[in-house]
Amino acid sequence: MPTVVRTFDSFRHTNYRFLWASTFFFSAGYWLQMIIVGWLTYQLTQSALLTSVVMGLDALPILLAGPLGGVIVDAWDKRKLMTVVLIYQSLLSLAFGVSVLAGVTQVWHIFAFVFLMGLSWIITDPARMALIPSMVPRQSLVNAFALNSLAFSVTRLAAPAIGGAILAIAGAGPALLVEAVLLAAAGAVILGLRLEPKSKSKMNIRSAIDDVMEGVRYIRSEKLVLTLLLFGLVPSVMVMPFFHGLIPVYAAEVFNVGPVTLGLLMASAGAGSVMGTLALASLGDMRRKGRVILGCVALASLAMVAMAFNPSLSLAYPILMVGSIGLMGYYSTAQATIQSILPDKIRGRVSGIYIMTFGLMPVGSLAAGLIAESMGAPVATFLSAIAVAVLTIIMATCFRELWRLK
């Protein structure tokens, strides 16, 4: 039987509350950006391919420089790093919002904006993942990571619906200004963290490479961590492009609806995320984590199959909800499991390598977009779901550590 903890147990820790609040504002801005970018791109291009690609483009910098971000996180003060990066994001949103209001936006501006926003992920993600284990006891890690996912899930429920309404009423420019305010709030809240001061380490190209290689050597020596990282490629490349890149295409081409309904579709996925993360937070330090990880990915795959054959808008809402329960359940459990294994001194470096799995999302987005462009979004979704199911079975068979993980 799993150890049952209070659902909001990690909120007893002051630093965790500040980090969670910052994550809440940050993720609200992120989900608002997703609906703005997806809708704006499709309206300008009428292209499923370009829409799918731009929706996953912010992950490309993670692929290119994820390990470097982890090295920076280990070497510098995480609180200051996150504050600077969040303010950078806020200013970038402000600048792009002004350009949209001025009526000078072109398609390449959207791609540049999304890519530049993605650069900040190489810092914020490893820093957030590395901070959480220092704020709560080990037995509360699943709870803490589930509640961290809850911040994304709650805002995923509300922000797209609100963003769709703002888009319909005021347009993309004002919506981007709202995003800028939310990101500034995230940077301000992070200043409330009270951490042990850390002096800046000297870092040059050689030392950075050595630090990255130390993280790589650790992963190679820990088969369980390596297995979890490899399996992370499956949802990142084949599931996330559906939930991020193809929903605007479904809204426009399959269901023939506008931005408000698009926001509601994305919000239904957010509702599923809330359910999944609350359930995990309540279970706490459960046993059989490996089977939970595999089961959650299988659930997301089944939801994708259902969506591929679904012609009804009303049925799309519960399907997206169920799929998101699986997706968020996977990420919360996998992240908590990895962080519970890592020693503090290389936590940032390994986290930086781990988020490289997210960096491969543009590859999946490109493939999904190409198929959707020529054969339709449902076909792209179905083929991705079959690939997920096959690879999950292969991984569970070849890497028995994943099946036996407790």
Image: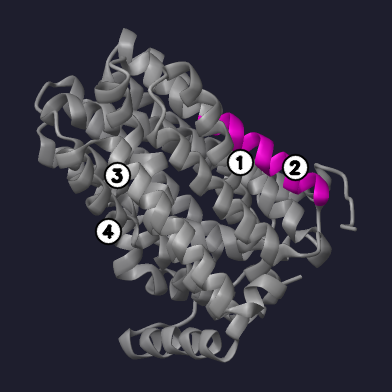
State which region is magenta.
269-283
Residue that appears at 72% across and 53% down: 144
Disc 4 marks which amino acid? Val
Residue 101 picture location, percent across and down: 19, 20
Of callouts 4 and 2, the N-terminal one: 2
Q: Are marks 4 and 2 in contact (CB under 8 Å)?
A: no
Calculate the distance from the C-alpha at mark 4 to the C-alpha at mark 1: 24 Å
Mark nearer the N terminus (3 vs 1): 1
Viewed as shown, does residue 127 lie left or right of 120?
A: right
Q: Quadrant of residue 376?
A: top left
Residue 319 lies, in percent from the top left, at: 52, 31
Quick one: SS at disc 2? Answer: helix
Q: Which residue is mark 2?
A: 279
Q: Which residue is mark 3?
A: 380
Q: Dot 3, how many residues are within 10 Å of its Cα: few (below 14), some (14-19), or many (20+)?
A: many
- The residue pinned by badge 1 equals 325
